[in-house]
Image (cartoon, rainbow, N blue to C red):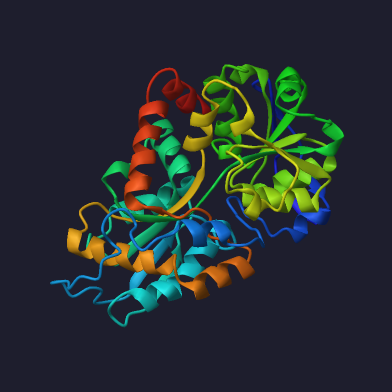
Amino acid sequence: MLNLSWLTMVRRKTVINRREIIASIGTAATLGLAGCSSSNGGSNDTAASETTGDTGNGEGDETESSVDYPTEEVEIIVPYATGGGFDAYARLTAPYLEKHLPNDVTVTVKNVVGGGGVKGTTETYNADPDGHTLMIWDAYQGVTQQIGRNVGYQLQEMSHIGAVTQSPNSLISMESAGISGWDDFVNRIDELNFATQGVGAISHTGVVLLGELTGAWAEEDVNFVHYGGTGEALSGLERGEADVFLVGPATSGLKVVKALNSEMTIMFSDPVGEDSIYHGVPKQYSGDLDIENMDQYARLTRFRRFFTGPPGVPEEILEIQRNAFSKIIQDEEFLQETSEKGRPIVNPGSADQVSEVMGEQFETFGSSPMKGIIQGVF
């Protein structure tokens, strides 16, 4: 039984207070999905074919370092609770970071929960820049939170290492909604209820930004049902309280499709390179739609789990970290283990790629009217 405390339904910006709901979560309980989880038992063809020894910063080179690093325990901060995708990827990566760093040290994982990731990011940002504190985070969520909230850090200043996975988002709809594709979805936008994991989650901000960038709808056209996490959102979908759910990443979307009477209506990606991961699940690719700014939306909202550190980490230490990261994402044992545990390595990227996308996100989301929309959401 799941206690859905003070479920808040927002319909056309009208907040309706509801009594505490006690409901059986049924199939949703078997998913094990946390607020930002990612899971898929698929192959790692994309990771294996697109990953090279050079991560875009020269990290693939074997060079003699003049610094002795690491000299003590390395800690990876996860800004969410245990059990989610960020936590899983951090714990899967930790032993391989131990393996590929030059010195024999322990790598531990620490969950710092609070503020939707803000508390953990703040702790990482303020840590000593000696390379012994790392963090796993998502570019889209980090950027939109920095723009929309009063936070005490600047993501642009942090010392990025690389993205372990970059997966597209997807729009999941219940079969009962009978959505036939993008055009039908847009025409019925004000009839549908959108599940979110909470105010400010990508399932919330992503829908608002999609409408704004494509010009297909305005925020006031959308009926949001805000829940307290992914599990509660899935329960709401199962009970018929919501019809659609924007899921990031799409690997988590697969779990929803398999567990509920739902379908992947749209994947925000080009079809090239994706089907080997998503097993031919029926879907409409955004890359096949001739919609203004759709490609930009798909690129900027792609779910990127990246490792970073506090500002000011010396370049020699960063080079060691990036070199180790490059080896990890090519390690066959690592790729096999992540695939077997439902956390595939999808399109890993370099520190330069993370910085480039983050710069575009700040430029796009930080200017009018997008900035005002994001600030209004938070």
Q: Is residue 309 above or below residue 199?
A: below
In the picture, the quarter occupied by the N terminus is bottom right
Q: Is residue 364 above or below residue 200?
A: above
- The quadrant holding residue 288 is top right
- The quadrant holding residue 188 is top right
116 or 106: nearer the viewer: 106
Residue farthest to the bottom? 104
Task: Give coordinates of residue 184: x percent, y percent.
Answer: 76, 22
Residue 218 visible in rendering: yes
247 or 2: nearer the viewer: 247
Q: Is residue 337 above or below residue 146?
A: below
How many circles with numbers are drawn on the protein?
A: 0
Who's the residue at 67% across and 41% down the image?
227
- The quadrant holding residue 217 is top right
Q: Is residue 312 left or right of residue 56?
A: left
Q: Is residue 146 above or below residue 210?
A: below
58 or 90: nearer the viewer: 58
Who's the residue at 18% across and 63% down the image?
316
Task: Give coordinates of residue 180: x percent, y percent.
Answer: 79, 29
Residue farthest to the right? 176
Residue 154 visible in rendering: no
Task: Give coordinates of residue 253: x percent, y percent.
Answer: 68, 47
Task: Give coordinates of residue 190: x percent, y percent.
Answer: 73, 19
Q: Is residue 191 left or right of residue 268?
A: right
Who's the residue at 57% across and 48% down the image?
273
Q: Is residue 94 left or right of residue 176?
A: left
Who's the residue at 51% across and 75% down the image?
333
